[in-house]
Image: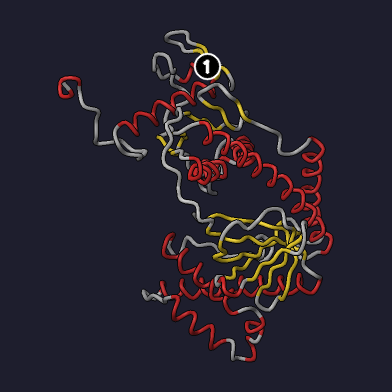
Amino acid sequence: MLTGRRYLLAFTPEQAAYAEQVGAACRAVWNTGLEQRREYRRRGAYISYVEQARQMAQAKKDPACAWLADAPSHTLQQALRDLDRACREHGTWKVRWRSKTRTAPSFRFPDPNHITVRRLNRRWGEVRLPKFGPVRFRWTRAIGGTIRNATVLREGGRWYISFCVEDGITEVAPSGKPPVGIDRGVAVAVATSDGDLHDRAFATPGEEGRLKRLQQRMSRSLRTHGGNRRSKRRDATRAQLGRLNARIRARRADFAAQTAVALVRDHGLVAVEDLRVKNMTASAKGTTEQPGRNVRQKAGLNRAILGKGWGRFVLQLEHAARYHGATVVKVNPAFTSQTCNACKHVARGSRESQAVLRCVACGHQDHADVNAAKNILAAGLAVTGRGDLGIGRSVKRQPSDRLAA
């Protein structure tokens, strides 16, 4: 199976400056290629990756575009390939621009023949990349397979390299372990139908206060300098914010990975809600003609949802399930938090609070998130019992007792 290995790079100052230059070139190729594709669409025409790659090769010969030749050619071609795939999957008008300030620089080396890795000692390894030469990285784990490609990216002021590795492991056959339902929440990140609650604080109180102060400083620096976004003081504040947010993201990723592995290791089927997190965290500002309502409350809810890492947790579940013989089933999330698991009565008034559900029909009381997880498990078992894994209504049904006899 294909998996990832990520390591911390130890660039020299010259290599770090060159990496910034390559990242800027790939960003320029992406943005130029996207604008070209949109212009073709406006005319009712289409341009392919092959034609864009040919035009980029010609542009390298132009003295005005000599900076393109300084970057490794494979990284620029890979940027065009990624753009072509994004446009085919999502549509040309839905693909986003890559911002100089908001998009972290990254670039990929797609040819494994151009990547050489060797271990130097217990703590350090070395990778040779085109036009970079030897680059040291922290050896925190073995590569464990054949390298397919490598991606260099900057996060929180540090440079990392991610290897896509073929580890030679085949997917494990489905296990006969008991199933479990999972409810993702805001107060508690993960609640299971077994009654377990998994949560942790990703930022300390001190870090939350510092994060707020840095955000306020960013806002004040923008107003003080008359909207000059290239202020050195603003850049320094942005760098501090990036390092702090990177530390919080690392804790969130660690929590998601450890919790996912623990769940798929002990259960053969994991049922989760098919939540559209992107739609759920959309802004409620509205338009000038029709302004939104409860905008500040919705913004707080959006931050809480994103802060728990709902989307990343499901990705980790699906990744870990391949190695432990588990199946991840996504079910319709409608009314799972308002349905009593004992009598199946649906009522909004049954939710007494964030943590307590007391059924208005039968009086059954349970933890609200655990009750929702039990409903999710029941929906997941019903879906798999009909023989499909879709989240919509199934056209199949269980055979009746008369037909089974």
How many circles with numbers are drawn on the protein?
1
- Give the image location of residue 12, x and y in percent: 80, 70
Q: Nearer the viewer, residue 355 or 122?
A: 122
In the image as oriented, which residue stretches furthest toward the top?
Answer: 363
Answer with the quarter of the image where residue 274 lies: top left
- Give the image location of residue 295, x and y in percent: 60, 39
Q: Tell me the colour scheme of the image.
A: secondary structure
Q: Nearer the viewer, residue 214 or 76?
A: 76
Quarter containing the C terminus = top left
Q: Nearer the viewer, residue 399 or 158?
A: 399
Asked if residue 56 shows in the view, the reply is: yes
- Give the image location of residue 228, x and y in percent: 77, 64
How would you rate the neighbour count of disc 1 (Cα within 10 Å): few for under 14, some for 14-19, many for 20 or more?
Answer: many
What residue appears at the point 52 percent right and 74 percent down from the top-left corner?
A: 33
Residue 33 higher or lower than 54, as above or below: above
What residue appears at the point 53 percent right and 83 percent down from the top-left corner?
A: 56
What residue appears at the point 60 percent right and 32 percent down from the top-left corner?
A: 189
Query: Which residue is label 1 attached to?
Result: 357
| Horizontal side, residue 19 vs residue 207: left or right | left
Q: Nearer the viewer, residue 199 or 355?
A: 199
| Horizontal side, residue 166 vs residue 202: left or right | left
Residue type at mark 1 is Leu
Q: Secondary structure at mark 1?
A: strand
Asked if residue 229 shows in the view, the reply is: no
Residue 165 higher or lower than 385, as above or below: below
- Give the image location of residue 336, x and y in percent: 45, 27
Residue 239 higher or lower than 270, as above or below: below
| Horizontal side, residue 224 vs residue 319: left or right | right
